[in-house]
Image (tube, rainbow, N blue to C red):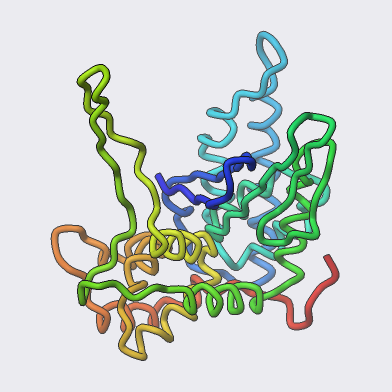
Amino acid sequence: MHLCIVVVSASLVVVVSTSGALAQREARPDDDALRAAFEQRYERWQVVRREALEGPGSDLDTAKLFGSEAWQRLTQLGVGAVPLFIKKLPHDHMLGHALHNITGWRYHVTRTGASPAEWLWRVAEFPDIQSTGGPPDAVAIWLRWWGEGPEFAAQSFRDLRARWPETATPGRRLLWATETYLDTIHGQLHTQQRQLTPAGEVYDAIQCLGIAVLPHIVETLREGEADFLPIALELTDGAGGLGDPTRPPEVAAFLEWWEANKQDWLIPWPEEPEEP
């Protein structure tokens, strides 16, 4: 399970996103076939959705809803269907979960304020999106991401890469650390929860950009910088087997795989920026 974390002060409450592997993808069909498949699979998922609402009580059975074959087949349409999900999103906010599964993008919401009357929620990636009555509307956040286009990931990656710190040991960067201390009053050892290092914060934030960052990671690989290869492998579900943990990945092998498969991972952004 992947965890995206925003490091903030103790006065902030952080809402994080977690997920497993990105949705498995099918070969991208032509536009008409893709549109027809999307509508057919979406309607099938609506049937499952109605069934998930049936039964005792009114709670939604999310395990049935998002674990169903209909949901898997819908998200398997992959990046080519992202514009179709975006178009329908204002009428069905749950499709934000599909966009999350397909693109891997994860946003973060922070809350400030000492009491409910003072609470203010703000989207870390788009600070002007904020609300006082509860977390901001997820639909608005996704539409803003789509309207920003590829430049959002490009600029975010440039900023994060500029913060990528040098380490004292060549060839090594510490991403996570734990602290074990002795409680001298009770004679007990305690280990604190794993904490991100400054390098880990940057690494995690890059991964949270999702597959939109892949072209930029590829450029760094071509420049001879392999630091972010593990992120590329994670975002591409192992790049067709290159992410085998029993053997070290090779940059050349990944770049060869990327050239053969990149069309299945490039988001079809609108040609002109769209209004959020």
The mark tally for this picture is: 0
Rendering coords of residue 49 (x, y %): 67, 31
Q: Residue at 63%, 56% (x, y): give it.
A: 37
Q: Hey, which quadrant is residue 29 in on the image?
A: bottom right
In the image, is 248 to the left or to the right of 16?
left
Q: Hey, which quadrant is residue 30 in on the image?
A: bottom right
Q: Residue furthest top?
A: 56
Rendering coords of residue 164 (x, y %): 42, 73
Rendering coords of residue 269 (x, y %): 67, 75
In the image, is 106 to the left or to the right of 188?
right
In the image, is 122 to the left or to the right of 166?
right
Q: Observer-nearest residue: 213 or 111?
A: 111
Q: Residue furthest left?
A: 246
Q: Observer-nearest residue: 20 or 137?
A: 137
Q: Residue furthest bottom?
A: 223
Rendering coords of residue 236 (x, y %): 40, 64
Q: Observer-nearest residue: 12 or 228?
A: 12
Q: Residue at 26%, 35% (x, y): give it.
A: 181
Quadrant of the drawing holding the N terminus: top left
Quadrant of the drawing holding the C terminus: bottom right
Q: Hey, which quadrant is residue 112 in on the image?
A: top right
Image vertical order of residue 63 relative to residue 254, above or below = above
Image vertical order of residue 98 relative to residue 87, above or below = above
Q: Observer-nearest residue: 149 or 16?
A: 16
Q: Residue at 35%, 83% (x, y): give it.
A: 221
Image vertical order of residue 9 relative to residue 262, above or below = above
